[in-house]
Image (cartoon, rainbow, N blue to C red):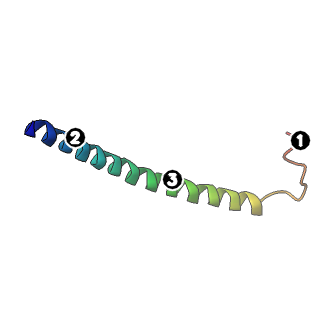
Amino acid sequence: MFWKVLAGIVAVWLLFVLLGVILKGLFWLVTVAVIAAGIYLLVKMFSGSSDPTADRRR
């Protein structure tokens, strides 16, 4: 019985460790994606044409 409880505790601990590593990696990936999207939108906003219907004609 002791070994089953210990194995369960170790399994839950490993699950939390893996989840933490995955979330840490995703946090930086999402951060970089948000920054890149913001820069893209800023560039698009400042370099757009003066005709507001230019994008609709394509």
Camera-nearest residue between 1 and 30: 1
Q: Residues within 10 Å of mark 1 (few under 14, many from 20)?
A: few
Above or below, 12 against 45 in this view is: above
- Residue at mark 2: 11
Q: Residues within 10 Å of mark 2 (few under 14, many from 20)?
A: few
User: x, y (%) of residue 23?
Assistant: 40, 51
Q: Residues within 10 Å of mark 3 (few under 14, many from 20)?
A: few
Residue 10: image quadrant is top left
Separation of residues labelled 1 and 2 (CA atoms): 58 Å
Q: Circle 1 sits in a helix, a strand or a loop, which is it? A: loop
Residue drawn at x 51%, y 58% as measured from the top left: 31
- Residue at mark 3: 30
Residue 28: image quadrant is bottom left
Residue type (three-letter) at the residue carrying disc 3 = Val
Observer-side mark, 3 or 1, equals 3
Observer-side mark, 3 or 2, equals 2
Observer-side mark, 1 or 2, equals 2
Residue drawn at x 34%, y 51% as measured from the top left: 20
